[in-house]
Image (tube, rainbow, N blue to C red):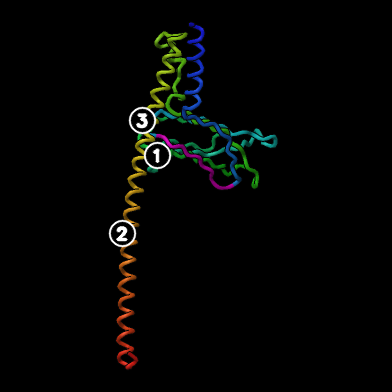
Amino acid sequence: MAESAIMLLAATMIMIWWATPSQAIWLSLPSSGTKCVSEEIHNNVVVLLDYSLVLGGDDDPSHPTTISVRVSSPYGQNLYYQEKVTKGQSAFTTSESGAHVACFWLDGNHEEGAGRTIDIDWKIGITAKDWDSVAKKEKIEGVEFELRKLEGIVNAIHENIIFLKEREAKMREVSETTNSRVAWFSLMSLGVCIVVAALQLWHLQHFFRKKKLI
């Protein structure tokens, strides 16, 4: 019975953990220009961004290729900026809800026409938490530790659901406002068409009577 409960708990942990926001990607950078990635994150969430430049076989160790990085908030505030680096890490707590953008570009000390690849790992919310430190600090382990992780994951999912509901409510409000404006515009257009048609009819009748055609 206890073994079945532990297996059920493990399966639940895996499913919930899979649904928790986390993103690891490879991004190809052109020899010139900027490439950006964005993530929708709500307010007061811990974010950990790890990035590293994937070196090619033709890179010169004495003159390594470097990149510049900028992370900005939805309203354009710079949260992190580094230049002439090959790897790094950015950790911050969001103060705004919306799309947070990380932009990367190659510095000038590289071969023209040769692009590069960056390994990017977004860790958001519960996935950015250092559980090993928590376990050591609170001296918990085993089932209690797994339950603590499960509690954190459930809280994170609950916060994400609330955030999605708020976004849905805002989008519904915008949609209703847009529909109302379109309806008024349609009525106004119909009214203008009716008035123009009536004026044209009056003008034609006046013209034909003047010419004594009717």
Marks 3,1: beta carbons within 8 A: no
**On the picture, is 137 further left or further right than 66?**
left
In 3D space, how far apart are the residues under numbered discs 1 and 2 (Cα atoms)?
Answer: 31 Å
On screen, residue 124 above or below 111: above
> What residue sits right under mark 1 in the picture?
98
**In the rendered structure, which disc, 1 or 2, sits on the residue that comes first in sequence?**
1
> Which numbered dot is residue 146?
none
Residue at (51% x, 31% y) in the render: 23
Q: Quadrant of residue 91?
A: top left
Residue at (43% x, 22% y) in the render: 153
In this view, the mark in front (2 or 3): 2
Marks 2,3: beta carbons within 8 A: no
> Which numbered dot is residue 44?
3
Q: Position of residue 155 (x, y in %)?
A: 38, 23
Q: Position of residue 144 (x, y in %)?
A: 43, 10
Q: Position of residue 205 (x, y in %)?
A: 31, 85
Predominant SS of the magenta segment: strand
Give SS at disc 2. Answer: helix
**In the rendered structure, which disc, 2 or 3, sits on the residue that comes first in sequence?**
3
Amino acid type of the residue that numbered disc 1 sits on in the rendered structure: Gly
Residue at (32% x, 45% y) in the render: 173
> What residue sits right under mark 2 in the picture?
184
